[in-house]
Image (cartoon, rainbow, N blue to C red):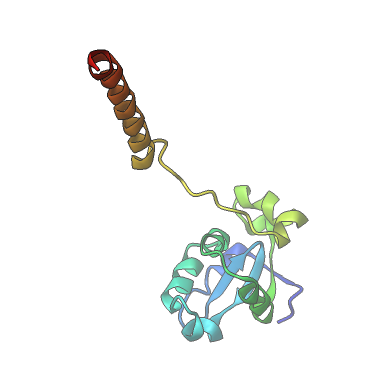
Amino acid sequence: MLASETFSFSEISTHTSKDDCWLIIHGKVYDVSNFLEDHPGGYDVLLQAAANGDATQSFEEVAHGSSATSMMEGFLIGSVHVDGLPKEKQARATDPFFAHKPQKIKQATSSTSFMDNLLHLLTLALALANWYYFTYINVNA
């Protein structure tokens, strides 16, 4: 198969077994069947990503380095036929900016963390200590 070949989403979704595993990352299709046993995260991670359809988000969440990205070129077999992608992924797959640049995933954080509350409590304690000192101790000295 040539890397310029296009595959439908339904065709790609039939390649999700340990003997035949294809992944979609940034609109490109990779045959990782021969890499499953060598994957540092284990073969089950790749099988799960293949079963979920588009593995782009899973790939980006792990923050693979440049060596992984360059290694991927050896597994490239083609691209996804855009009409076969879900609507929310079609624009992203055809945008050349996103085809080569990973999307940064912002980590969800709690709006109030323990450290934020601790800082407020320490400030309040310091203010109360100052008030007590200047009201009762400094007056009597």
Which quadrant holds the N terminus?
bottom right
Vertical position of residue 111 compared to residue 39: above or below = above
Vertical position of residue 3 compared to residue 124: above or below = below
Q: Nearer the viewer, residue 88 or 116?
A: 116
Report the label total.
0
Query: In the shown orientation, is residue 133 left or right of residue 82?
Result: left
Residue, far front? 141
Vertical position of residue 138 compared to residue 71: above or below = above
Which quadrant holds the C terminus?
top left
Quadrant in the rendering for residue 4: bottom right
Q: Nearer the viewer, residue 75 or 106?
A: 106
Query: In the shown orientation, is residue 10 left or right of residue 5?
Result: left
* x 33%, y 41%: residue: 114
Q: Nearer the viewer, residue 90 or 74?
A: 74
* x 61%, y 75%: residue: 68
Q: Nearer the viewer, residue 35 or 83?
A: 35
* x 33%, y 28%: residue: 126
Quadrant in the rendering for residue 63: bottom right
Quadrant in the rendering for residue 48: bottom left
Query: In the shown orientation, is residue 132 left or right of residue 26?
Result: left
Residue 134 percent across, percent down from the top left: 30, 17
